[in-house]
Image: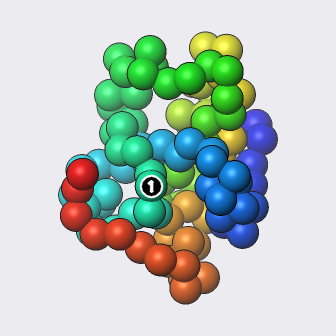
Amino acid sequence: MREIDVAQLEAALRDGASLIDVREPSEYAEGHVPGARHIPMGQLTNRIDELDKDAPVHVICASGNRSGVMVEVLDAAGFEAVNVRGGTSEWARSGREIERGSK
Protein backbone atom coordinates (compact mmCIF):
# COMPACT_ATOMS: atom_id res chain seq x y z
CA MET A 1 0.00 0.00 0.00
CA ARG A 2 1.31 3.41 -0.96
CA GLU A 3 1.38 5.97 1.86
CA ILE A 4 2.32 9.62 2.19
CA ASP A 5 2.57 11.98 5.14
CA VAL A 6 0.65 15.23 5.58
CA ALA A 7 3.47 17.38 4.15
CA GLN A 8 3.41 15.27 0.97
CA LEU A 9 -0.39 15.51 0.92
CA GLU A 10 -0.22 19.30 1.18
CA ALA A 11 2.09 19.40 -1.84
CA ALA A 12 -0.12 16.99 -3.79
CA LEU A 13 -3.21 19.10 -3.08
CA ARG A 14 -1.39 22.22 -4.33
CA ASP A 15 -0.81 20.28 -7.55
CA GLY A 16 -4.52 19.46 -7.88
CA ALA A 17 -4.72 16.00 -6.28
CA SER A 18 -8.06 14.61 -5.19
CA LEU A 19 -8.66 13.73 -1.54
CA ILE A 20 -11.43 11.49 -0.21
CA ASP A 21 -12.31 11.65 3.51
CA VAL A 22 -13.85 8.32 4.57
CA ARG A 23 -14.82 9.27 8.14
CA GLU A 24 -18.37 9.41 9.45
CA PRO A 25 -20.42 12.58 8.76
CA SER A 26 -20.07 13.92 12.32
CA GLU A 27 -16.28 13.49 12.23
CA TYR A 28 -16.06 15.23 8.85
CA ALA A 29 -18.21 18.14 10.09
CA GLU A 30 -16.01 18.56 13.19
CA GLY A 31 -13.02 19.29 10.97
CA HIS A 32 -11.52 18.18 7.67
CA VAL A 33 -8.73 19.01 5.27
CA PRO A 34 -9.85 21.87 2.99
CA GLY A 35 -11.01 20.50 -0.35
CA ALA A 36 -11.54 16.96 0.92
CA ARG A 37 -14.50 15.22 -0.65
CA HIS A 38 -16.60 13.34 1.88
CA ILE A 39 -17.49 9.74 1.04
CA PRO A 40 -17.95 7.74 4.26
CA MET A 41 -16.22 4.37 4.43
CA GLY A 42 -19.55 2.52 4.40
CA GLN A 43 -20.56 4.21 1.13
CA LEU A 44 -17.31 4.09 -0.81
CA THR A 45 -17.87 0.77 -2.61
CA ASN A 46 -21.33 1.92 -3.75
CA ARG A 47 -19.99 5.27 -4.94
CA ILE A 48 -16.73 4.06 -6.50
CA ASP A 49 -17.93 5.09 -9.97
CA GLU A 50 -17.75 8.73 -8.83
CA LEU A 51 -13.95 8.50 -8.70
CA ASP A 52 -11.51 9.06 -11.56
CA LYS A 53 -9.45 5.94 -12.35
CA ASP A 54 -7.04 8.03 -14.44
CA ALA A 55 -5.64 9.98 -11.47
CA PRO A 56 -4.33 9.03 -8.03
CA VAL A 57 -6.94 9.05 -5.28
CA HIS A 58 -5.67 10.16 -1.87
CA VAL A 59 -7.66 8.74 1.06
CA ILE A 60 -7.79 10.11 4.60
CA CYS A 61 -9.53 9.30 7.88
CA ALA A 62 -8.74 10.28 11.47
CA SER A 63 -5.48 8.36 11.85
CA GLY A 64 -4.80 6.35 8.69
CA ASN A 65 -6.37 3.03 9.70
CA ARG A 66 -9.77 3.20 7.98
CA SER A 67 -8.29 4.98 5.00
CA GLY A 68 -5.70 2.20 4.73
CA VAL A 69 -8.49 -0.37 4.41
CA MET A 70 -10.21 1.74 1.76
CA VAL A 71 -6.94 2.15 -0.17
CA GLU A 72 -6.76 -1.64 -0.40
CA VAL A 73 -10.34 -1.74 -1.72
CA LEU A 74 -9.57 0.94 -4.30
CA ASP A 75 -6.32 -0.75 -5.33
CA ALA A 76 -8.23 -4.00 -5.90
CA ALA A 77 -10.72 -2.09 -8.07
CA GLY A 78 -7.94 -0.76 -10.31
CA PHE A 79 -7.37 2.68 -8.78
CA GLU A 80 -4.02 4.21 -7.88
CA ALA A 81 -4.89 4.89 -4.24
CA VAL A 82 -2.70 6.57 -1.63
CA ASN A 83 -3.18 6.44 2.14
CA VAL A 84 -2.47 9.55 4.22
CA ARG A 85 -0.43 8.39 7.23
CA GLY A 86 -1.55 10.04 10.46
CA GLY A 87 -4.79 11.25 8.87
CA THR A 88 -6.72 14.35 9.74
CA SER A 89 -5.44 14.19 13.31
CA GLU A 90 -1.86 14.62 12.12
CA TRP A 91 -2.95 17.33 9.66
CA ALA A 92 -4.47 19.32 12.54
CA ARG A 93 -1.56 18.64 14.95
CA SER A 94 0.83 20.04 12.36
CA GLY A 95 -1.02 23.37 12.44
CA ARG A 96 -2.46 23.12 8.95
CA GLU A 97 -5.85 24.65 8.16
CA ILE A 98 -8.99 22.72 9.07
CA GLU A 99 -12.45 23.40 7.62
CA ARG A 100 -15.51 22.83 9.77
CA GLY A 101 -19.04 21.89 8.74
CA SER A 102 -20.28 19.70 5.95
CA LYS A 103 -20.47 20.58 2.29
- For badge 1, the amino acid type reads Gly
Q: Nearer the viewer, residue 18 or 63?
A: 18
66 above or below 97?
above
Residue wearing tag 1: 35
Label 1 Cα neighbours within 10 Å, binned few <14 / some 14-19 / many ≥20: some
Q: Residue furthest front?
A: 15
Query: Which of the 4 image quarters holds residue 55?
Result: top right
Query: Which of the 4 image quarters holds residue 87?
Result: bottom right
Q: Is residue 76 visible?
A: no
Q: Nearer the viewer, residue 53 or 82?
A: 53
Q: Nearer the viewer, residue 38 or 43?
A: 38
What is the x, y in percent for residue 58?
A: 61, 43
Q: Which residue is at a point 60% across and 82% down the rendered structure image?
A: 94
Drawn side of residue 62 relative to residue 87, left or right: left
68 above or below 101?
above
What is the x, y in percent for residue 35?
A: 44, 55
What is the x, y in percent for residue 27?
A: 29, 60
96 above or below 74?
below
Query: Which of the 4 image quarters holds residue 52?
Result: top right
Secondary structure at numbered mark 1: loop
Q: Quadrant of the N terminus?
A: top right
Q: Which residue is at a point 37% across and 21% down the rendered structure image?
A: 47
Q: Which residue is at a point 35% across and 69% down the rendered structure image?
A: 99
